Image (cartoon, coloured by chain):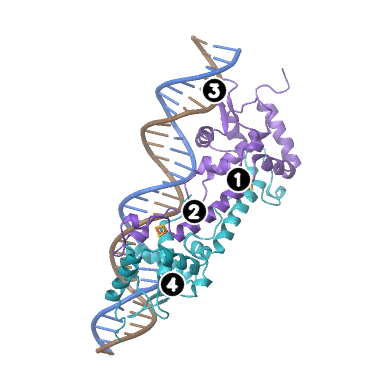
Chain colours: A purple, B cyan, C blue, D brown
Amino acid sequence: MKHSDGLEWAIHSCTLLAALPADMALPRRLLAEFFGLPEPYLAKQLQKLSRAGLVETRRGPKGGYALAHKPKDISMLQLVEAIDGSERHFRCSELRRCGPTGMPPRQYPKPCGIARTMWRAEAAWRRELSQTSLADIQQLGLQETPPEQMAKALAWFQSNLPMEGKK
Amino acid sequence: MKHSDGLEWAIHSCTLLAALPADMALPRRLLAEFFGLPEPYLAKQLQKLSRAGLVETRRGPKGGYALAHKPKDISMLQLVEAIDGSERHFRCSELRRCGPTGMPPRQYPKPCGIARTMWRAEAAWRRELSQTSLADIQQLGLQETPPEQMAKALAWFQSNLPMEGKK
DNA sequence: ATAATTATGGACAATAGTTATCCATAATTG
DNA sequence: CAATTATGGATAACTATTGTCCATAATTAT
Ligand code: SF4
Ligand code: SF4
């Protein structure tokens, strides 16, 4: 019972994408380098984000990844579900129907109290996640990232992005 | 990201134990038979419950498992944590410190907004679970179990329990 | 005391899920 | 056409979950 590591990578990646100038795509090579992550596996996470419609991709030179929506329109719940799936965490195996006292399925019109309780808790979790957007995360990040790191990051980008400030 | 199957087994087992006359212990052979579960693995779940102090165990003939507290004093959260552990589901690997722009640890006095958001959602989940007790589950079960199954179960117990109504 | 019953916990094996890599292919740019 | 970049399938390594087995300890009844 644990989220995949890829989830953290994906959220961080989106946070970075959110900070990019509009219209600019970041290739995954740079994304992976920036966070010190294995590029091929990060690719899988980005593909999930892409399939979920949260990021746009552009192939070819000057291509890469960019957010598909404004940060305020992407919720943490969407990110989590894109990576870890939207299946319920508690899955009922209809244990009550097993064993010597079980009855045929039609005797159980609705999920039992155990399942309903577990699912109610999951709903509370989802609700909480859906109420925080990438914009909220971004704002906290801007406030709390050490100024020196901001400077380092800026410098790193300027020396790694194909053209920045040139034009 | 999914709960272990053993969780469902453990909750069902406790529900059954809750229905037992006080002072009566149920051996795990019968528990496993009643639900049609593999006994040795069910044993592992029951051991976790025992170590968490939720069930009492008695060895020897007439021994078995019994609840250690009244059903109303055992919350679903306790059961879930006994089986699946109480570690956080989202575990931070301090990604922000990685890569070419990372800074030394002391620059990050508190967990970032991403981690705090994920943890806030988990807290909502825990809160919901802590507000339902085994007594609530039991009541729902009594209301919603098909009457025929109740009868079957009663009969099964009377023919399997060492002495019931004999004395 | 002895025999029968029952839980414990360690060791182990099988299965499934996660993490990671590689490569051939397709799309885009210039 | 050449260079760049994402896609997705195949595969391998690693880890967690699921399941089994057994020697041991505790308890009860005879
Ligand atoms: S619905 Fe309830 S009784 Fe049936 S298997 Fe799920 S948790 Fe168990
Ligand atoms: S604290 Fe935040 S920034 Fe650091 S690794 Fe965890 S999620 Fe990422």
| Residue A143, numbered circle | none
Disc 1, SS? helix
| In the rendered image, residues at marks 4 and 3 fall on the same chain | no
Point out the image quarter for the C terminus of chain A.
top right
Give the mark toward the camera: 4 or 3: 4
- Give left or right: position of A164 versus B26: right
For residue A59, the mark is 3
Q: Chain of mark 3?
A: A
Residue projecting furthest to the right: A147
In-image side of A164 versus B7 (left or right) = right
Query: Residue B110: horizontal and vertical position, in percent?
Result: 69, 52
First in sequence: mark 3 vs mark 1: 3
Closer to us: B20 or A26: B20
Q: Which residue is mark 1?
A: A130
Mark number for residue A1?
2
Q: Residues within 10 Å of mark 3 (few under 14, many from 20)?
A: few
